[in-house]
Amino acid sequence: MASSGIFRNVNIIKELNAATGTQMIQIYQPGTLNALDVVNNARYSGFITSLRLTVDVTSIDELEVVENDILADDATIAENAKSTFNNNAKKCLSFFIGNSDTPPIKVVDVFIFNQRPFYYISLLPYFTGASTFDIAPDSIIAVQQTEVGYGLLQDDDRILILGTGIEESPVYDQLVLTVE
């Protein structure tokens, strides 16, 4: 008989830098209960409540934004945004999701610019329209640097991935688990 469950909070903390290279790096996978818990080796399900990048990249030229006139129409604003994107140096992070049945599949490419002194990018909207992103016990989220013509992270470039998750594992009735 299942009851409400065992909960714990976890922090997601990963740093990407020049040493990271193009290797795929696991950002998050729900944890495993330890041998002293209610059920040995049971896995948690994860509920990511926040996930963001803190970007501090100086190895490329600083972003130059094509400004909009206050009376610009939507088409002009869209064209200026496109020009800003296309005419500036950028880096790229590719985010993946996989599980025990499916190898990691790319979800999104997030482009990184040099904006001083640093800036944040919320990642949750890339994974879900909800306020949390639910992760099955056997699923992973991973990231990889992708070359887009301006090199990988270099020198003092640094991208910090910060997040918070709540993990839950069911609690089982000990009478059901007891083998006689």
Image (cartoon, rainbow, N blue to C red):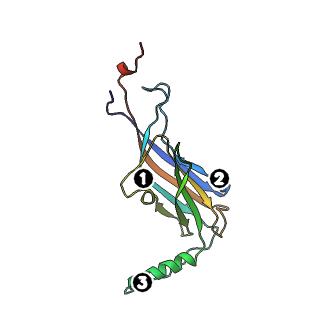
Rounded to the nearest angstrom, the CA distance separating label 2 from label 1 is 24 Å
Q: Quadrant of residue 115?
A: bottom right
Q: Quadrant of residue 7?
A: top left
Residue at 56% x, 77% y: name it: 86
**Residue 127 horizontal/vertical position (percent):** 44, 56
Which residue lies most toward the front here? 101
Is the residue 128 above or below the residue 47 in the image? Answer: below
Mark 1–mark 3 contact, CB under 8 Å?
A: no
Q: Which residue is mark 2?
A: 23
Q: In the drawing, does residue 3 fall left or right of residue 86?
A: left
Q: Secondary structure at mark 2?
A: loop
Rounded to the nearest angstrom, the CA distance separating label 3 from label 2 is 39 Å
Q: Amino acid at mark 3?
A: Ala
Q: Secondary structure at mark 3?
A: helix
Q: Earlier in the sequence, mark 3 or mark 2?
A: 2
Q: Secondary structure at mark 1?
A: strand
**Residue 77 horizontal/vertical position (percent):** 43, 81
Residue at 36% x, 55% y: name it: 130
